[in-house]
Image (spheres, rainbow, N blue to C red):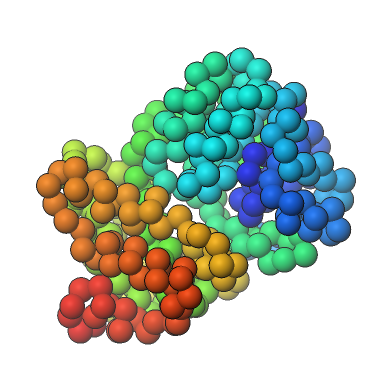
Amino acid sequence: MAVVVYGAGGIGCYVGGRLVASGMEVGFVGRPRLAGEVAEYGLTLTDYLGTEWRVDDVRYATTPDAAASAELVLVTVKSAATASAAEELAGVLRPGVVVVSFQNGVRNAEVLRERLPEQVVITGMVPFNVLNRGGGVFHQGTQGGLDVEDHPALDEYEDAFRRAGLPLTRHADMVAVQWAKLLLNLNNPINALSDLPLRDELSQRAYRRCVAAAQAEAIDVLAAAGIEPAQLMAVPARRLPTVLRLPDFLFRRLASKMLAIDPHARSSLWEDLRARRRTEIDYLNGEIVQLAATVGREAPVNAKLVELIRAAESGSRRPWTGDALYAELTGRRA
C-alpha cells in the first residue's frame, strides 16, 4: 500500500514516520527546509511514554508529482494551504485515490472534496500534540490515536495503522468530533501567549480562566448555530469551562487527566510563532468569530485572541501573565 504524506511538517513527519517504522511504504512531500533536515538526520520519533523509533531511509520529496503513485494520501498541510494543496494533488492523483485530511479546523475536508471530485476524501483529526524538537526529532507529547470519518475505503488500511500504534477510531458524526476538538484547541493561542509548556500553563487557574472564557463563548455560539460538539473527555463539552475555573487544588484532584501531559508539550501555534510562521488562528478561534457572525452574534473573547496572535505574528510578542491576559480578554480582573 503506497502512502504519501502531503505537507509533511510536525504531524505529517510523526504519523508518516510511525507508519514507516512499522514496515509500511510511505513517501513524504513537504518544504525544502524539512527535506534537507530529514536528509541529514533521518527521523527520530519519541512519545510521552518514553518510546523511541528511528527511521533512516526517508523518501522526502518537494514536488507534487511524488504523490502520483499513491493509493492513500494523508494531507497534513496548514489550513491556509489546503486549497493550493488540493489543486496540486488534482494534477497528479489517479481517480479513486483515498485522501484523508488530518488537519486542524472544521472545513478542510470540504475544500479538498470541492477540488478532488474524482478521489475519495475523508475527514480525519489528530487528537495529540507533536513538537518539532529539531534535528529530525518529532515528539508526541499527549496521548491519542487517530480519529476519522467512518468510511469503507479505510477498511484495508486499519491493520497497518494499528500495527504502527496509531489505531483509527471511526466516527459516524465526524463534524461533532471536529467541533469538540476545536473547543479544546481554543487554548492554543493562550498557550502561545503564555510562552509556557502546556502542563505549566494549565496548572495555573488564571490561564485556565482565559481558556474557560473562550470556550464558554464558543459553546454559546455553537448552541445558537444548532451544533452539538461530541464528548471527547470525561465531562461533556458544556461543562468544561466550569471545570477549568476550579481552584488549583480542586482542579488537580478532579481533572488530573487534563494535566497528564508530557512536560515538553506545547501548542502548534506556539511553535509557529517561535518559527515566525503565519499561524492557524483564523481556523481556530477565528472559526468561532465567523460562526458567531452567521447567527447574528459576537464573540469578543475569541476575536481578541485572534487580534493578539496577529500582533504576535507581526513581532509584538511577549509572555502574558494569566491575570493580565484574562483582564485583556474580558475587561475584568482575574
Which quadrant would residue 22 be assigned to in this image? top right
Residue 120, image x, y percentages: 54, 21
User: In the figure, is residue 265 to the left or right of 133?
Assistant: left
Name the residue: 28% across, 67% down: 304
**Is there any visible trace of residue 319 in the rendered image?**
yes
Which quadrant would residue 52 be assigned to in this image? bottom right
Residue 207, image x, y percentages: 35, 76
Pick the front one: 168 or 254: 168
Q: Residue furthest front?
A: 314
Residue 317 position (above or below residue 36): below
Residue 42, image x, y percentages: 83, 54
Quarter of the figure with the C terminus: bottom left
Name the residue: 46% across, 71% down: 314
Pick the front one: 301 or 180: 301
User: In the figure, is residue 240 to the left or right of 124?
Assistant: left
Name the residue: 40% across, 34% down: 174
Name the residue: 34% across, 45% down: 179
Q: Residue furthest left?
A: 296
Residue 216, image x, y percentages: 22, 60
Quarter of the figure with the N terminus: top right
**Is there any visible trace of residue 265 in the rendered image?**
no
